[in-house]
Amino acid sequence: MRGLTPEELRAAEEDWAVEQALALVGRQSSGEPHPARRPQSADQLHFADQPHFMDFGSSGQPNATGRPHPTERSASAFQFPPSPPDQSAGRPHRRDRRRQAAPWREARALAARSGRNAPARVRRLPLDQALGHVLAEPLVALTDLPSFDTSAMDGWVVTGPGPWTIREVEGAGKEKGSGDTGVGPRPGQVLGILAGHSTPITLPDGDAVRIATGARIPADANAVIRSEHAHVDEAKGLLHAKQRVLPGQDIRPRGQECRSGDQLLPAGALVTPAVLGLAAAAGYDELVTVPRPRVDVLVLGDELLTSGLPHDGLIRDALGPMIGPWVRALGAEVSAPQRLGDDVAALRRALTTSDADLVITTGGTASGPVDHVHPVLAEIGAELLVDGVAVRPGHPMLLARLKTEGSDVGPYLVGLPGNPLAAVSGLLTLAEPLLRGLAGLVPETAYRVVVRDEVHGHPHDTRLVPVVHRTGSTGDSAGYLGDAGTGSSAEHVIPLHYNGPAMLRGIAAADGLAVVPPGGVRSGTEVEILDLPWASATPWTEGCFT
């Protein structure tokens, strides 16, 4: 059994005390057993009853690195050259790793800037292929909408005061799509003015003629009377209005929606079905879009099974099936996961030959004996942008810029911790804002919602806690969100149990993650919410982006 150095033991004890306190609070409220005893050695850090909040790397060994000291978190502290290697482990020294952890909000902002600063790429796509892409340039109207005065209703178009003499328009035009099939109006059939009728007519003062929705308004006509608001005196050939007729009623004037040259949508807007309709109406046959980011997923760890039940120290791979669909829901194109085990050469080869825009690795970002991500990044000369984030779970996450064969500027790399919820934290902290930037999306707008229950926080780091949205009474006997005993019907979120770094049960039931500041929040406090992609209002071709 290897003993910890005094420095390592102090760091482990500090994290142990924090995590045990958080676990104890959760277990006392849920009736779970009390947390484990404090660690005395490296082996004792890995108990079967390990508390939910301890992070593990892909090797199954715990990451004992702790929080950065508050005085060591400058705004630029996480933009640093590679750290001097630990002589015994060949990776950055544990103490350096603690000092370099980036504040959560700054790490997320840096990831977003990195995506936005990537070289711009554009692609012209026909409308039927543009769904789910992002506009690379503003959508500008190519015509007035509508392009002429049109009827907003089926009824009668009139000129001057009533009653009006009914005018017959025989065979005013073919029905749309009739072509030469003979399906069009018969000679002598009274149809009135139809949509798509290309020959404008004049309407003398005091006359009325039938008109269809979307049809061109005759010159000098001043109103449309809906069919249900009109009475026809067939004997006299007169039209009477059942109610007062206002000038311009039920007429859509030319340019009512926009004028040619108006900006309809900015660059960065997501192409939804409604955007396709607007683009078509505005005269577009194709759109200039930003290509979807391409992502490679590398699953690390010899201990992972792809099928069957866990056995003999092997566990099921939860991240391989999850990361690809998650990233697709963020609007990216994802290759099939590459399962590399703990093979250093395979990892090096995958990182230096990838032609993707982003490489995501799972596990291997901590300091265990088979955590190879840091050594390989140093070996290939990658630029380490973020090395650890002051967030729980997921603090060993990282962001780097790779160098590939024949190029000094390669894809970005997001290194996710091996624990499932810690990996989700990394996706939302680094991968999502980076992908939004690479996709050309406008920055998302943060929003806040009241949390129903008290949430205990880490003393120094941000916590990301799975939550569900609810609308209804949130008050208790004290009425903390309303009058005593009445509560409030406002939207709120409820924190979920099973929120340890190795757990997925909570996040599987969640709508989003609450951003809990150091120290925690009381019930009734507003917290920032990170939506999960499928809970967001932003639609994608294969899922939904924020």
Image (cartoon, rainbow, N blue to C red):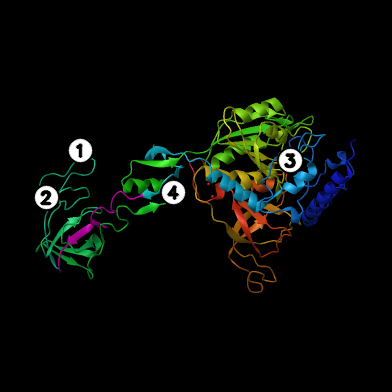
- Tell me the number on the disc at residue 462: none
Q: Amino acid at mark 1?
A: Gly
Q: Nearer the viewer, residue 275 or 244?
A: 275
Q: Which residue has dot 1 on it? A: 179
Q: Earlier in the sequence, mark 4 or mark 2?
A: 2
Tell me which residue sits at (37%, 53%) in the image. 263
Mark 4 in CB contact with mark 2 (< 8 angstroms): no
Secondary element at tag 3: loop
Q: Residues within 10 Å of mark 3 (few under 14, many from 20)?
A: some
Q: Which residue carries the number 3 mark?
A: 83
Q: Look at discs 3 and 1 and give the one toward the viewer.
A: 3
Q: Position of residue 360 (x, y in %)?
A: 62, 37
- For badge 3, the amino acid type reads Ser
Can residue 110 be seen at all in this image of the molecule?
A: yes
Tell which circle, 4 or 3, labels the residue nearer the N-terminal end: 3
Badge 2: few (under 14), some or many (20 or more) residues near its Cα, within 10 Å? some
Check disc 4 and give the amino acid type: Ala
With 432 as the anchor, is 25 left or right in this view?
Answer: right
Q: Which residues are magenta?
A: 140-161
Camera-nearest label, 3 or 2: 3
- As measured in the structure, the alpha-carbon distance from the residue carrying label 4 to the one carrying label 1 is 39 Å
Q: In x, y percent, where is residue 304?
A: 71, 31
